């Protein structure tokens, strides 16, 4: 071991207890604990009052400790340094700016640009080349009719990647160029239900035509656009972590977004809004939340749309969206149903409505299916996923690699027979 890597000097002189403790980075008392456990051997030299230690034995123990400590650190410290989203004291921030206020005042495209670049971009708009949209639309359209929106988006992302020969260019400007193409490509690849804007206009307008055949009013379009901005990022949610792992392995941004899409279908993540949507429809059908909530509790299910592990109080995203929904007359019945659900469930567990319930009010009152919640979530979160991929591309590769703590039988074992 050389002096450069913190090793012992080349001298064969035995080490004192103090020297041993310094080289091991422990207290002298711990050195004697190592002796009692048989990890070190001490010897008292003639005429000496203290114990001495073999430098090679100390060297071996130091190496072993560093290896074990490094493994433990990698296995337990999964924190990721990020400059994107902070969640604190029942508020959340995009690059230090209150995200709820940002979503109130800026379009989804402008919020996406803020997440990607940290620079304001008034009037930002996204457009995709016809080759990308055609490939994505053809692939998504080849799926069975009952395929879910996330299935279509995932296939669309793969097809768009195949149509982009420069997808492996991970330079920041190249990734930003891909980002501004990928988001509209995903939206335009979805089947049209209403009047198609033919790849023109804001993302919210184009998405609306793929969620419902109802003609939108300005208030409803504003609510959808704000919902997209509110949901653009939320720190290291499960899907975002998957994106960062893919980006850490230097997968292109299409593949990183596909990794995120593969995670959100779970009922505890992107599909939660759909469950809340169906709950609201049940309450509207029954006329009251009591028997509906009772049925959920009787089946041992949590009430969707209520509570959030990161907010002790009100979900700030829900607050903003509910305020906008109050300005939409046709949303009043679904809004009343959501309030009834929250008030009824509060007698069991006092939980605040979360953004899933607010999004469900928007979709249920706009003639959309329950799958629309998942679609809105996926399109919205694509902006955040790309922001995290951009950030991860600037980190050392493959750093998202925790070590497993093996708990199986110790080798060697004989080969299995039979």
Image (tube, helix red, strand yellow):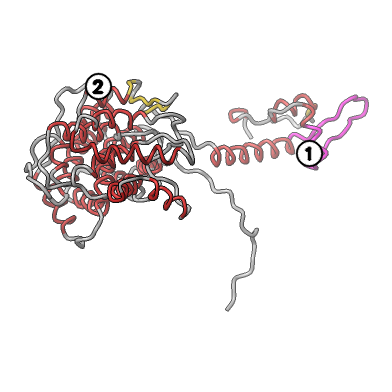
Is residue 266 found inside the magenta-colored segment of the image? Answer: no
Query: Is residue 360 visible in this depiction of the protein?
Result: yes
The residue carrying pointer 1 sits among few (fewer than 14), some (14 to 19) or many (20 or more) residues within 10 Å by Cα, namely: some
**Which residue is identified by label 1?**
40
Magenta-drawn stretch contains 42: yes
Given residues 132 and 30, the one toward you in this image is 132
Res. 347 mark: none
Instruction: Identify the residue under disc 2.
Output: 119
User: For the point 47% across and 53% down, which residue is it?
Assistant: 298
Q: How many marks?
A: 2
Disc 2 to disc 1, C-alpha distance: 58 Å
Q: Is mark 1 on a helix, strand or loop?
A: loop
Task: Looking at the picture, tell me which residue is in the foreground, 54 or 259.
Answer: 259
Front-most of 52 and 164? 164
Give the residue furthest to the front. 287
Q: Quadrant of residue 35?
A: top right
Left or right, 306 with reference to 65:
left
Residue 104 in picture, x, y percent from top left: 24, 25
User: The C terminus is located in which quarter?
Assistant: bottom right
Most distant residue in the bottom direction = 418
* Residue 88 coordinates in the image, percent (x, y): 43, 25
Is 280 left, or right, of 304 in this rendering?
left
Q: Position of residue 247 (x, y in %)?
A: 35, 41
Magenta segment range? 31-55
Choose top left, top right, bottom left or bottom right for residue 174. top left
Question: Which type of secondary structure does the marked residue at label 2 adopt?
Answer: loop
Q: Earlier in the sequence, mark 2 or mark 1?
A: 1
Image point (21%, 36%), residue name: 224
């Amino acid at each position: 071991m050389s002096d450069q890597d913190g090793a012992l000097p080349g001298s064969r002189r035995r080490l004192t207890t103090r020297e041993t403790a310094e080289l091991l980075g422990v207290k002298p008392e711990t050195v004697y604990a190592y002796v009692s456990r048989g990890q070190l051997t001490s010897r008292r030299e003639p005429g000496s009052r203290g114990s001495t230690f073999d430098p090679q034995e100390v060297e071996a123990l130091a190496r072993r400790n560093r290896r074990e400590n490094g493994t433990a650190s990698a296995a337990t410290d999964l924190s990721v340094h990020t400059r994107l989203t902070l969640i604190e004291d029942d508020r959340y921030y995009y690059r230090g700016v209150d995200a709820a206020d940002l979503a109130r005042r800026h379009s989804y495209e402008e919020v996406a640009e803020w997440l990607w670049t940290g620079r304001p971009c008034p009037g930002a708009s996204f457009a995709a080349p016809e080759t990308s949209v055609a490939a994505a639309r053809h692939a998504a359209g080849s799926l069975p009719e009952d395929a879910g929106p996330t299935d279509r988006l995932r296939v669309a992302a793969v097809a768009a990647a195949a149509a982009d020969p420069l997808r492996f260019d991970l330079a920041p400007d190249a990734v930003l160029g891909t980002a501004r193409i990928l988001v509209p490509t995903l939206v335009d690849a979805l089947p049209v239900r209403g009047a198609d804007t033919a790849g023109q206009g804001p993302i919210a307008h184009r998405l609306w035509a793929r969620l419902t055949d109802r003609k939108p009013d300005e208030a409803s379009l504003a609510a959808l656009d704000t919902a997209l901005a509110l949901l653009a990022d939320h720190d290291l949610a499960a899907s975002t972590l998957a994106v960062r792992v893919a980006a850490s392995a230097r997968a292109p941004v299409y593949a990183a977004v596909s990794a995120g899409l593969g995670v959100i279908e779970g009922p505890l993540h992107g599909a939660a809004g759909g469950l809340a949507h169906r709950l609201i429809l049940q309450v509207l059908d029954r006329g009251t939340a009591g028997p509906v909530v009772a049925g959920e509790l009787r089946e041992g299910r949590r009430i969707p749309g209520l509570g959030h592990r990161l907010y002790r109080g009100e979900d700030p995203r829900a607050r903003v969206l509910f305020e906008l929904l109050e300005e939409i007359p046709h949303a009043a019945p679904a809004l009343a149903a959501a309030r009834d659900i929250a008030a009824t469930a509060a007698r069991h567990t006092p939980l605040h409505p979360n953004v899933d319930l607010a999004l469900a009010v928007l979709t249920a009152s706009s003639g959309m299916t329950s799958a629309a919640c998942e679609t809105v979530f996926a399109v919205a979160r694509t902006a955040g996923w790309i922001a995290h991929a951009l950030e991860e591309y600037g980190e050392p590769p493959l750093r998202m690699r925790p070590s497993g703590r093996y708990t199986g039988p110790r080798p060697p074992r004989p080969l299995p027979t039979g």
